[in-house]
Amino acid sequence: MISKLCNEVFERAINDYHLYNDIDKAYENPFEEGTFDNVLYIKCWIDTAQWHMEDEIRNPSIDPVEALKWKRRIDSSNQERTDIVEVIDSYFLTKYKDVQPLETARINTESPAWAIDRLSILALKIYHMREETTRANVSEADLNQRKGKLAILLQQQIDLSLAIDELIEDIQNGEKYMKVYRQMKMYNDPELNPVLYNSKK
């Protein structure tokens, strides 16, 4: 099942990141270059580093200049995230290119890669919520509330994993077909963002 592989790789990437807990730490990918596992690891490492960037920018006492620096790093990270999602979709497009969809085949609301993107973020939520269930100096009521949230996240992981596996199975069987629209993020493109192209004048 593809979701089992995703969840295992995501958990490893998150645990590896937190050995250092350093946004600037360069990752050492344990999986062979060019493999699907390798791409999944990169995907989750990007997400994990960005999770902590988002924490930094929410510091209520942050200097505005410093906040702007974080905002630009987050924008850059978001572009990397989008790019790697498209690599994942390309993997599935290639893998199932010879599958002939049935006449009754339907398109899914999102591509497999964007569902896997949500699975990566969910793995991060689970990791950090689990941390919150063991915090010291927190009331029993608060801890119980966090444990309840963790239980919901874990159930969501089960449900999303199943949905991804069923989507892939449907694509394999020709019951659903992939149609990928590349993300056309205009605000990062110097030829499409008017603030950027007007600044050249």
Image (cartoon, rainbow, N blue to C red):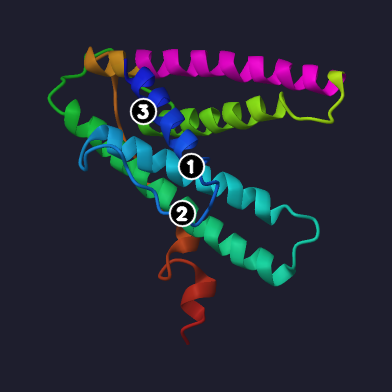
| Residue lying at 44% horizontally and 17% vertically, measured from the top left | 161
Q: Nearer the viewer, residue 178 or 19?
A: 19
Q: What is the quadrant of residue 7 in the picture? A: top left
Q: Between tags 3 and 2, which lies in front?
A: 2
Q: Amino acid at mark 2?
A: Lys
Return the x and y of residue 67 as percentages of the image width and height: 67, 64
Residue 112 shows which numbered tag? Answer: 3
- Is 186 on the left or on the right of 181, as rendered? right
The secondary element bearing badge 3 is classed as helix
The residue under label 1 is 17
Label 1 to label 3: alpha-carbon separation: 25 Å
| Residue lying at 55% horizontally and 46% vertically, measured from the top left | 21
Residue 119 shows which numbered tag? Answer: none
The secondary element bearing badge 1 is classed as helix
The secondary element bearing badge 2 is classed as loop
The range drawn in magenta is 141-166
**Secondary structure of the magenta portion, mostly?**
helix
Neighbour class for label 2 at 10 Å: few (<14), some, many (≥20)?
few
